[in-house]
């Protein structure tokens, strides 16, 4: 069998002549269904009879074999439209085909438009005023199709239909009338819409507005042009909403490269609710109300979180928050909090106050992050959970924050107490501000992690109203803080904590090292995002911050000994401010966001929708890894489940294409694909099998065996 693209190229070269030859072959008409090879075709009437001078619709009905398709009036990047040539008695007239809204059919790097399954192409037929009632008229149509799967086959038939001529108009045909009426009802309509287009650099802006579009769902809006040269069909169509319409950002086709570019852009606008409108846009300024509200909220498919509903989303968020405590990225902070509770293990009231302060810090920070994320998405940004770590200045500032916490735990300087109380370690700390700060810091550090159950909950929340999203994030924060609140309020649990003592001072010093590790990890993330020069800036700032901490410690020592303070305290503040300014000041140059490992055990390619479509068109299984350098869970999975010899052998044995979608830096294409699968962040693992329409979502915590079984199932189709 020919490979798909080779067969497609052959079809493009041969389709036109083959279809034309189909019309030239004299054949007797068949009054009924005809199997042309890969579809069954027939002519079906919308009415039981036709009256003199009346116009009725007769449809070309195609029942296409599974896996095959035919083409729309503009087939897209390749293919050929279905053609009908009528042979009618004198005085009879046939109109143009009423084309249903087509489906998008990606094939490798191409995008085609056509139909699969069953489709009806209605045609208006008008009887002459002098048609004699009581007679039956035979109408003949020579039809030609290009029918494609992995290969394309030109097929044809000569079809006939007998229509009784009645004295008065009849009702719908008892067998086919409803189907023809539904096809006409669903066909694109010409309605009062104002449309205009304008070339803006390498983009083509198509703006459409009017009362039929007010309040419409634009989540999957798409423009099918009538002219095959108008746009690059394979390129995505970005959507911006307006109060009364939308604006599509298209990529111009080679028709716009001619010395006389088009002055009209006509086609079909299709909406997610099934409505479709014929539009004819003129070159000129955009109509009012066609933009200004940002992109539509992403919609997840079934199974990706879209059908959760608020109660289930709250339950998933609560459970995900509990499990988030087990993620490695939050271990250092939670260990600090556990030590803090141990310091009040036998002071019940104080422990409860600290538990509530920790809860307040967690909830306030979760809701603040949620509010910022909702605002960014409403403004049109492609943002998801962990979005703040896609900003190099934020990553650098967090690295300095982790370093400052580590220096504090190491005893270089103190926060919230003088060194006089340091001898009693953490037990002497009773400030609620410290507990609140610990809760806030725990959420900030947890941002790179996505626990099981979190992904569908957040994916659902970010497609809902702001109020519903905040409720889900509140539940997530509640689940995250719940273990420590329970320990603080349940006497039996609180009494099991060890008594305060000298051991706590040593434990506090020990906790500094995970924080140094967190600072080092964030420095590595910054290097992946912005290169070596960004790391140099961060290291210089880290030295300045360490010096500031040391100067602050000296000032605290002198104050504790009753000595006159020197300028060390002021100098510490100046140095700390300079260190922070050095890393948050703009000017980072993005580095190529690639995986840090120099040589992966399993060869992979960079993800793109075009590469995914091409691999699937070749009939190969595809494994897509949505990851980021700042995602701890992602890195653990890649170091364990995706590096074993068993998994590497499964990739090679099944011929699976491994695509890596790196979200370390902001990427609207990856963000949109995550949202399409009901996810607000990474990790996400998809496996596409042979012939499968949608990818299978794997668990967020991978094992080698899970990956092997998924690849083998995908290869088996």
Image (spheres, rainbow, N blue to C red):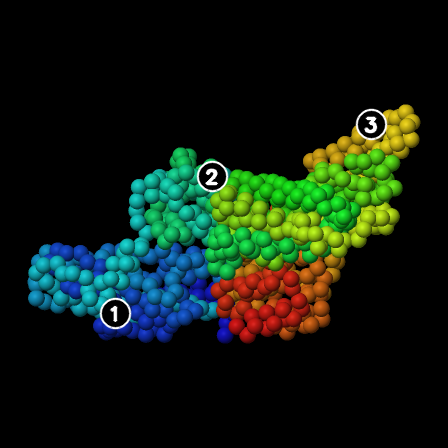
* Callout 3 secondary element: helix
Q: Is residue 266 shown left or right of residue 232?
A: left
Rendered view: 130 above or below 164: above
Q: Earlier in the sequence, mark 2 or mark 1?
A: 1
Question: Few, some or many C-alpha atoms within 10 Å of disc 3 (few <14, some 14-19, many ≥20)?
Answer: some
Rendered view: 208 above or below 301: above
Residue drawn at x 49%, y 41% is 294
Q: Earlier in the sequence, mark 2 or mark 3?
A: 2
Rendered view: 154 above or below 75: below
Q: Is residue 686 shown left or right of residue 43?
A: right
Residue drawn at x 19%, y 62% is 172
> Badge 2 is on which residue?
293
**Badges 3 and 1: C-beta atoms under 8 Å apart?**
no
Residue 589: quadrant of the picture:
top right
Q: Earlier in the sequence, mark 3 or mark 1?
A: 1
Q: Is residue 449 visible?
A: no
Q: Is residue 233 visible?
A: yes
> Badge 1 is on which residue?
159
> Badge 3 is on which residue?
570
Residue drawn at x 82%, y 48% is 500
> Residue 568, image x and y in percent?
86, 29
* Callout 2 secondary element: loop
**Badges 2 and 3: C-beta atoms under 8 Å apart?**
no
Quote the CA–CA distance across marks 2 and 3: 48 Å
Quote the CA–CA distance across marks 2 and 1: 51 Å
Quote the CA–CA distance across marks 3 and 1: 94 Å
Residue 279: mark: none
Give the mark toward the camera: 2 or 1: 2
Identify which residue, 717 or 310, lies in the foreground: 310
Question: Few, some or many C-alpha atoms within 10 Å of disc 1 (few <14, some 14-19, many ≥20)?
Answer: many
> Residue 471, image x and y in percent?
54, 46
């Amino acid at each position: 069998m020919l490979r798909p693209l080779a067969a497609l190229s052959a079809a493009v070269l041969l389709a036109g002549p083959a279809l034309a030859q189909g019309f030239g072959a004299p054949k007797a008409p068949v009054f009924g269904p005809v199997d042309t090879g890969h579809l069954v075709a027939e002519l079906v009437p919308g009415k039981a009879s036709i009256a003199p001078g009346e116009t009725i619709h007769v449809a070309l009905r195609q029942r296409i074999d599974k896996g095959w398709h035919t083409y729309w009036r503009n087939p897209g990047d390749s293919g050929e439209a279905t053609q009908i040539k009528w042979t009618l008695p004198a005085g009879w007239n046939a109109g143009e085909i009423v084309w249903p809204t087509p489906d998008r059919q990606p094939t490798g790097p191409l995008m085609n438009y056509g139909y699969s399954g069953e489709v009806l192409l209605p045609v208006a037929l008008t009887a002459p005023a002098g048609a004699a009632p009581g007679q039956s008229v035979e109408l003949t149509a020579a039809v030609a199709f290009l029918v494609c799967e992995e290969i394309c086959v030109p097929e044809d038939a000569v079809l006939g239909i007998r229509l009784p001529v009645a004295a008065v108009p009849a009702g719908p045909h008892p067998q086919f009338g409803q189907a023809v009426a539904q096809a006409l009802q669903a066909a694109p309509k010409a309605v009062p819409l104002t449309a205009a287009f304008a070339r803006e650099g390498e983009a083509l802006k198509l703006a459409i507005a009017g009362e039929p579009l007010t309040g419409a769902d634009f989540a999957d809006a798409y423009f099918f042009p009538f002219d095959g040269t108008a746009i690059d069909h394979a390129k995505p169509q970005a959507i911006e909403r307006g109060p009364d319409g939308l604006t599509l950002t298209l990529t111009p086709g080679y028709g716009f490269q001619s010395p006389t570019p088009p002055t009209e852009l006509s086609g079909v606008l299709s909406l997610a609710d099934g409505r479709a409108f014929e539009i004819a846009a003129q070159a000129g300024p955009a109509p009012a109300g066609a933009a200004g509200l940002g992109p539509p909220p992403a919609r997840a498919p079934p199974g990706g979180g879209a059908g959760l509903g608020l109660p289930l989303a709250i339950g998933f968020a609560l459970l995900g928050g509990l499990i988030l405590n087990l993620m490695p990225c939050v271990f250092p902070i939670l260990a600090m909090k556990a030590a803090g509770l141990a310091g009040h293990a036998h002071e019940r009231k104080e422990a409860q106050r600290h538990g509530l302060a920790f809860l307040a810090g967690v909830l306030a920070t979760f809701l603040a992050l949620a509010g910022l994320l909702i605002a960014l998405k409403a403004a049109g940004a492609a943002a998801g959970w962990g979005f703040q770590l896609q900003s190099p200045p934020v990553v650098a500032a967090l690295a300095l924050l982790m370093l400052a916490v580590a220096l504090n735990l190491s005893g270089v300087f103190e926060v919230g107490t003088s060194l006089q109380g340091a001898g009693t370690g953490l037990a002497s700390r009773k400030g609620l501000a410290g507990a609140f700060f610990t809760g806030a810091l725990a959420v900030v550090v947890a941002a790179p992690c996505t626990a099981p159950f979190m992904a569908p909950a957040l994916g659902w929340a970010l497609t809902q109203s702001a109020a519903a999203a905040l409720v889900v994030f509140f539940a997530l924060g509640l689940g995250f803080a719940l273990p420590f609140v329970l320990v603080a309020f349940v006497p039996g649990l609180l009494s099991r904590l060890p008594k305060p003592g000298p051991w706590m001072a040593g434990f506090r010093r020990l906790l500094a090292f995970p924080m140094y590790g967190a600072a080092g990890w964030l420095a590595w993330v910054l290097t992946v995002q912005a290169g070596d020069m960004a790391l140099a800036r961060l290291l210089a700032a880290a030295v300045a911050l360490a010096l500031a901490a040391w100067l602050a410690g000296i000032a605290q020592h002198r104050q504790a000994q009753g000595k006159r303070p020197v300028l060390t305290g002021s100098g510490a503040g100046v140095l700390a401010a300079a260190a922070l300014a050095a890393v948050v000041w703009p000017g980072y140059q993005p580095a190529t966001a690639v995986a840090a490992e120099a040589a992966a055990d399993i060869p992979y390619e960079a993800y793109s929708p075009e590469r995914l479509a091409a691999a699937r068109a070749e009939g190969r299984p595809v494994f897509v890894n949505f990851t980021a350098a700042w995602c701890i869970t992602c890195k653990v999975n890649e170091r364990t489940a995706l590096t074993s010899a068993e998994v590497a052998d499964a990739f090679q044995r099944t011929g699976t294409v491994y695509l890596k979608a790196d979200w370390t830096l902001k990427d609207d294409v990856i963000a949109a694909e995550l949202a399409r699968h009901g996810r607000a962040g990474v990790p996400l693992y998809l496996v596409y099998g042979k012939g499968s329409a949608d990818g299978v979502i794997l668990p967020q915590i991978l094992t080698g065996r899970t990956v092997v079984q998924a690849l083998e199932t995908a290869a088996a189709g």
